[in-house]
Amino acid sequence: MTTDQTWAVVPAAGVGSRMGGEAGDPAKQFRELDGAPVLVHTLRALASALGVTGLVVVVGEEEVEPVRQLLSQDAPLADALKAVVAGGATRQASVARGVAHVPDEVGIVLVHDAVRPFVRAEDIEAVIQAVRASGAAALAVPVADTLRRGASGRFEATVDREGLWRMQTPQGSRREVLADALARAEREGWTATDEVGVLQRTGAAVALVEGDERNIKLTRPSDWLLARALWAHREM
């Protein structure tokens, strides 16, 4: 019997090459922010949202046991953590492995980037409500900057930004819808950059939930500087 439970799958198997740093530095999801790895802060944010009752973390094969031990010792996560599993060769493959560990009775699955620790509980809850109403939903923020094409070192045509949105996570849907879409992608051999892309390619409509600009993805060195500033002024 399917319930209205919501579990979140967190792909955290990336190496984070764009973040830079010295050889031997931890991947961005394991870098410490205010005394704890970014991944831990992200999982705590997800677990704080009403309705999120389970967390599945997907990491590199060699990281499964260390991460399981790390998270099992974190009191705020002890009840919500359901599994730490090895990822695949791509983000999409890792998400598919995580979704495969969500029981059939769980009605809703969210997928959230491991390096978005500033997501607000109310935004997570808004996505869950939109999935309940529409079947699938995702956070996004409207594009505010002027967009212009460029090639060979010169600017070209300006792109109309009306109606353009920058995608965020979490992105989610009814569990069986996302599981079926990911399975179809594997069978047919195609990939998308996020879960919305996977869902749309299989014909699913996805509701838009406006997010918050502070829900940044830590990707480049400048993002790390911004994260430190945001952490000092985060909402408690």
Image (tube, grey):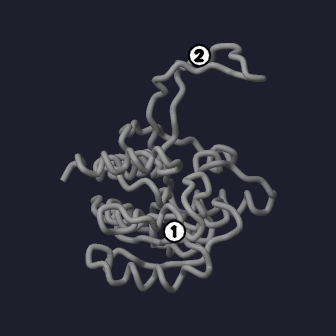
Residue drawn at (40%, 81%), measured in percent from left and top?
A: 70
Seen from the viewer's position, the closer of residues 167 and 108 is 167
Q: Which mark is residue 160?
A: 2
Residue drawn at (47%, 72%), measured in percent from left and top?
A: 56
Left or right of residue 233: residue 71: right
Q: Amino acid at mark 1?
A: Pro
Seen from the viewer's position, the closer of residues 228 and 78 is 228
Left or right of residue 232: residue 214: right
N-terminal of the pair, mark 1 or mark 2, is: 1
Element assignment for label 2 = loop
Q: Amino acid at mark 2?
A: Asp
Q: Which mark is residue 1?
A: none
Q: CA distance from mark 1 to mark 2?
A: 39 Å
User: Residue 61, relative to residue 44: is it above or below?
Assistant: below
Q: Quadrant of residue 22?
A: bottom right
Q: Residues within 10 Å of mark 2 (few under 14, many from 20)?
A: few
Q: x%, y% of residue 28?
A: 50, 61
Q: Residue 49: in sight, yes or no?
A: yes
User: Residue 145, relative to residue 231: is it above or below?
Assistant: above
Q: Residues within 10 Å of mark 1 (few under 14, many from 20)?
A: some
Q: Which residue is mark 1?
A: 26
User: Residue 23, relative to residue 203: is it above or below?
Assistant: below
Front of the two marks 1 and 2: 1
Q: Residue furthest front?
A: 22
Element assignment for label 1 = loop
Q: x%, y% of residue 84?
A: 50, 78
Residue drawn at (49%, 27%), measured in percent from left and top?
A: 143
